[in-house]
Amino acid sequence: MTRPTRLLAALLLAALPAQAATKVFLHDAVSKGIIPGGTDITFRQANSTQGSLKVTAVSNSIAGAVSSQYFPSGTAGLIVTKTAGGARTIWISDPLSSGVTISGAITPNLWGLESAALCNCGARYEVLRWNVATGGIASSLGISGDGGVAEWGTTPAARTAPTLTPTSTTFNTGDRIVIVLYNDDGNAVTEASGRTWTLDYDAGTGVDGDTYLSFTESLSFSADSNNAPSRATTSKLGLGPILWEMARSAVLGLATALT
């Protein structure tokens, strides 16, 4: 390559707009676009808007590692819960306002702590695609490893590893990003039961609870709304919200008639 050609290439590259990373913050508000899941799963909101006030999600510790029991596993304690022993909490973004291919590194910034050093608690996370066309979760972009990250401490701190290199996945306008946090061992230790670990989230910038996943790509979101006939994931029936409510009413009516 000649010197003039190299200079021209450098100028062209410099003229290209830099792709800005996007922080997707975890919030406490329940998503409007997904059936909350009753006592089984609550879908909470995630978007690029910074939170303002720290809240917590408390999970009972479990003996051993997550192993292969990832979403949609219903095993108690493997997925983060809002309260110890309570409903599993999964975060789902507002609808994407434009299509994007997610292929770059995803970096966590998770604030948390364990109730005691003997908890030996760590965490993993998974990112999935919710498809607007089918109204359900279509694929997983990947699950983080433990990355050699030590267990949580007994005072709040931010966990900024491991980075996840996702399977390159194309999202369409209206699709959503699903974030699942798992209860797991810390590095080189085995988690013990009978204790708890706490996720702090929905807080302001740079403080305890400033919890998010940072995506390499520039992402933009529309207002959270029921933008498709969402699938009732936890019903295991694959019904949209209207059909699900019709089925629920029919079952309740039959039960009343039989009593």
Image (cartoon, rainbow, N blue to C red):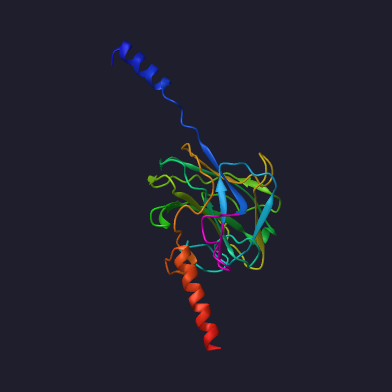
The quadrant of the picture occupied by the N terminus is top left
Residue 131 drawn at (x, y percent): 41, 53
User: Main SS type for the magenta part?
Assistant: loop
Query: Is 34 included in the stretch rendered in magenta?
Result: yes
Image quarter in which the C terminus is found: bottom right
Compared with 239, 3 (above or below) is: above
Query: Relative to 8, is 175 on the left or the right?
Result: right
Q: Position of residue 212 (x, y in %)?
A: 58, 45
Please tell me whether residue 128 is drawn above or below residue 163 in the rendered image.
below
- Residue at the spot x=44%, y=49% of the render? 175
Q: Is residue 69 visible?
A: no
* Residue found at the very far left of the displayed protein: 1
Q: Is residue 104 visible?
A: yes
Residue numbers of the magenta segment: 30-43
Towards the viewer: 245 or 116: 245
Residue 256, image x, y percentages? 55, 83
- Residue 181 is a magenta residue: no
